[in-house]
Amino acid sequence: MSTHTETVMSFKSEMEAHLAQSKLSSSGIKSTVHRFSRYRALASGGYLLKVSTCDIAQARAILNKVAEAEVDMDEYVSDDDESYTRCPVCRSVNVQAEPLSTQMFLLSVVLLGLPFLFIARDWSCRKCDHRWRT
């Protein structure tokens, strides 16, 4: 590895940085993880992944491709596991809770979070785009 290195990406956790380092290593790119002080590590960008300047473009392309890839949770969750929220139409576990409106969020904060216990949430399925309320 050349003595000249550049930061390819920064991470909030050491685990994320080492996972990215592993991905680069599997593609034949040598990299190192650098940690700043404990306080800077708690802030964003505390762990830096550095690669040789000649590998910087290829490393960014690999890491950007990984960041854009979506994980299909249906491959990892068995059909009889009911601990996950599922889409009522296609039974997929690739669902997400829609964010609350600004007014509802502020009301919940003012009332010390109690409305969060009683608010019906809107959900959407990432596979079939179905939307429903629980």
Image (spheres, rainbow, N blue to C red):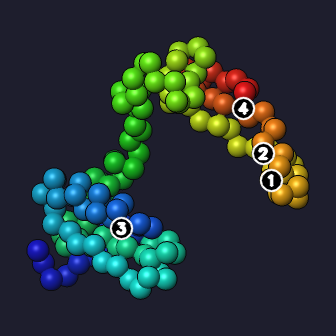
**Cβ atoms under marks 3 and 2 closer than 8 Å:** no
Q: Which residue is mark 2?
A: 116
Q: Secondary structure at mark 1?
A: loop
Disc nearer the start of the sequence (3/1): 3
**Cβ atoms under marks 3 and 1 closer than 8 Å:** no
Is 3 above or below relative to 53?
below
For marks 4 and 3, give the CA distance.
Answer: 34 Å
Q: Which residue is mark 3?
A: 14
Task: Report if residue 127 is visible in the image.
Answer: no
Q: Secondary structure at mark 2?
A: helix
Q: Which residue is mark 4?
A: 122
Task: Report if residue 1 is visible in the image.
Answer: yes
Disc nearer the start of the sequence (3/2): 3
- Residue 73 in which image quadrant: top left
For marks 4 and 1, give the CA distance.
Answer: 18 Å
The residue positioned 46% from the left and 24% from the top of the image is 81
The answer to which of 83 and 74 lies nearer the viewer is: 83
Local crowd size for mark 4, using a 10 Å CA cut-off: few (<14), some (14–19), many (≥20): some
Q: Amino acid at mark 1?
A: Gly
Q: Which residue is mark 1?
A: 113
With 36 as the anchor, is 55 left or right in this view? left
